[in-house]
Image: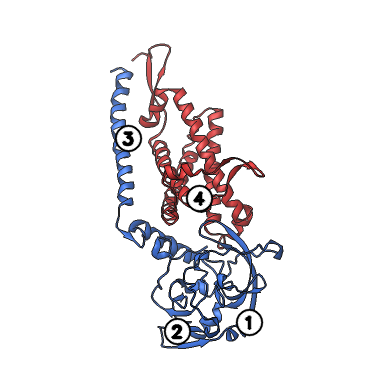
Amino acid sequence: MKKLQSRHALAIRCFHWINFAVLAVMIWSGLLIYWANDVYRIGIGPFTLFKFFPESFYSTFNIGFRLAEGMSWHFTFMWLFAINGFLYISYTIFSRDWRYGGIQQFAYLTIIFMGAGSLFTGLAVYKPTQLAWLTSLLGGYQFARFEHFWLTVGYALFFCVHIVQVTRAGWNNFRSMITGYELVEVEKASGD
Amino acid sequence: MTDEKAMRIRSRRSFLKAGVAVLGGVGSFHWLRTRRHDDGVPWPLRRVLETNEQLARDYFSASHLAPTFPESMVSLARENGGEGLSRDFDIRSWTLKVVSSVHSRRLEMTLDDIKRLPRVEMVTELHCIEGWSQVVHWTGARLSNLVAEAGSDARYVGMETPDGGYYVGLDMASAVHPQTLLCYEMNGRELTPEHGAPLRLATPVKYGIKNIKRIGTVHFTNTRPPDFWAERGYDWYAGL
């Protein structure tokens, strides 16, 4: 016997999917910006294991020579990212909607801190003179840019792990992020 | 009705709504992307950049100073951008032309006139809009000296190279910021032609694109001056 059980509030589902779309635009426009000074890599000294990013990546996704465009999208969608994130955190705190298990809760807390990290490192790079205190606190302009970049790599990794987890958890779980409900197995009929 | 059936009905309804939301999202993105361009970007994005500018100008303060660095962090200054630096330029006959369209004042200054203004030195980080930055030792006179002389009643300052090939606009608050310099020395040496000899702008409240080299004319005005890179899709304000 399966029973219908509410899982995710409408607000949480909205924040989740809006965040997905907004973050996608932020990462895409961020890549358009990053291209103009693509200095990061994985490697030691003269040895480079992986360069962010190979030419083939830029040409495949049409990233090159679009800095101005990237900045205009990035500095528009930053508002949506910040407002949606703020509402999500506020809602979670005020509704005490903490129904996840321990490890999942840890993962979601991590992603919230990463979100806040992106906001603050972003501000430090955006206004390094007006917000000089913040930029200095984060280790200076170039280090803030470095942090901002690696947080984004973190999202990409989180995304991969998240997809694997959602796939393994199955359709019922995925559906609950759309409908808000899931079907749970109960031992016996509850009388009605 | 069993809960399985109730779930099917809920699912159908929710997935339909989700489908509409996805279409709405993709449609909005497409709409934004295809708007008429205003100086190189879709106009709604241009309006947001202008709103960001207004908020930044509200927060801007002459007391928010860019950090200064020890001399040891100065590196060999990169030469970037040659727009407006045409070859047929005679540095010996150069003078700085200062005009105002608020009142019809005209000034002409030689490099010695500018060097007679209080000499200011600062070691600050230059931020290129491309994303790199460098610590530079700048020496020059505050632009605010010139504003006090000829443009205190204007809202904007426009500057252009002698050949008119490169031009920038500054809001007045940024122009009179204490770290906005008319610079004639860089890293302890006279400016080289590539760095904008005989006189360039150096200001850590703006991206490098506003730090115009080889200034020919300074223009005080109440209308927003044209800006080379703003016409090519960048934010006009470009404030840091």
On the image, the x and y values in percent for residue A192 come to 33, 15
Pointer 1 indicates a residue of which chain? B
Q: CA distance from mark 2 to mark 1?
A: 22 Å
**Front label number (1 vs 4):** 4
Circle 2 crowding by C-alpha within 10 Å: few under 14, some 14–19, many from 20: many
**Kind of residue at badge 4:** Tyr
Q: Give the residue pinned by disc 1.
A: B118
Label number found at residue B99: 2
Secondary structure of the residue carrying numbered label 1: loop
Q: Does mark 4 fall on the same chain as mark 3? A: no
Are callouts 1 and 4 both on one chain?
A: no
**Contact (CB < 8 A) between labels 3 and 4?**
no
Relative vertical location of residue B132 with respect to residue A45 in this rendering, above or below:
below
Rendered blue, the chain in question is B
Q: Nearer the viewer, mark 3 or mark 1?
A: 1
Q: Give the chain of mark 3.
A: B
Other residues around mark 4 within 10 Å, as few (<14) / some (14–19) / many (≥20): many
Q: Earlier in the sequence, mark 2 or mark 1?
A: 2
Q: Amino acid at mark 2?
A: Val
Q: Are marks 3 and 1 in contact (CB under 8 Å)?
A: no
The residue that mark 4 highlights is: A34
Q: Which chain is red?
A: A
Give the alpha-carbon distance from disc 3 to disc 1, as whole Å.
Answer: 65 Å
